[in-house]
Image (spheres, helix red, strand yellow):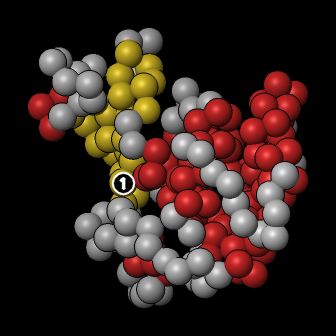
């Protein structure tokens, strides 16, 4: 999935601020699908979204962000239900080539998949040979309206250190991002 959009500073500031105000909702929704996801990885994904101008999309819908960020995450090392190491990766169906495709046609609701892989053999990441199964994930739309989520104090502190304090150091709306 590509993220290609021209930067719109006003829209970017508003969309990113809305995400930052409710980052714990997004994080916990993502963590329910990828339990090994860390706050550090989330902050890297936010930085990728910054560089790619994701926040500038006019039709961006906040409740889609956990799924978009998971799709951008690539492979995530995890454990299956038996405790064995596996890798997971997320993607949208083939109708979504650019993230804007999610919001283009109201009639088409894109499917979201969670793919589970065995550990790779001879390559740094799994290939189609290691694919064990894939699951269609229901994209929950109301998670941001639930009671306040509670991330651990350590997670909140790490998020604050990595992103919120860094944002205070930016000037004139320009992001200094290093990935």
Note whether 2 is above or below 152 in the view shown.
below
Residue at 46%, 45% in the rendered image: 73
The residue located at (85%, 32%) in the rendering is 157
**Residue nearest the viewer, comparing 58 with 137:** 58
Say if 44 sits above or below 48 in the image: above
Q: In the image, 99: left or right of 1? A: right
Helix, strand or loop at mark 1: strand
Please name the residue that numbered disc 1 is placed on.
Answer: 91
Residue 164 or residue 113, whichever sits in front = 164
**How far from the left and from the top, in percent, is residue 109?**
42, 75
Residue ID at (38%, 12%): 84
Where is residue 99 shown, x and y percent of the image? Answer: 44, 71
> Eyeballing the image, is 122 above or below 137?
above
Residue 100 percent coordinates (x, y): 46, 78
Q: Using residue 70 as the reference point, say whether residue 163 is left or right of it.
A: right
Q: Quadrant of the C terminus?
A: top right
Q: Quadrant of residue 119?
A: top left
Question: In which image quadrant can residue 134 be found?
Answer: top left
Residue 146 placement (x, y as % from top left) = 80, 55
Q: Is residue 47 visible?
A: yes
- How packed mark 1 is, by other alpha carbons closer than 10 Å (few <14, some 14-19, many 20 or more), is many
């Amino acid at each position: 999935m590509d993220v290609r959009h021209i930067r719109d500073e006003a829209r970017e500031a508003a969309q990113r601020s809305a995400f930052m105000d409710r980052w714990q909702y997004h994080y916990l929704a993502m963590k329910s699908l990828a339990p090994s996801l860390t706050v550090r990885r989330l902050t890297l994904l936010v930085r990728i979204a910054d560089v790619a101008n994701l926040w500038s999309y006019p039709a961006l819908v906040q409740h889609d962000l956990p799924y978009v960020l998971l799709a951008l995450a690539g492979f995530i090392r995890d454990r299956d239900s038996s405790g064995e190491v596996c890798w997971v990766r997320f993607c949208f169906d083939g109708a979504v080539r650019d993230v804007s495709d999610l919001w283009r046609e109201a009639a088409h609701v894109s499917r979201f998949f969670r793919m589970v892989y065995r550990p790779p053999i001879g390559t740094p990441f799994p290939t189609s040979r290691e694919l064990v199964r894939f699951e269609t994930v229901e994209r929950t739309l109301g998670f941001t309206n639930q009671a306040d989520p509670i991330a651990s104090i350590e997670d909140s502190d790490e998020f604050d250190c990595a992103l919120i304090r860094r944002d205070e150091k930016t000037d004139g709306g320009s992001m200094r991002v290093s990935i």
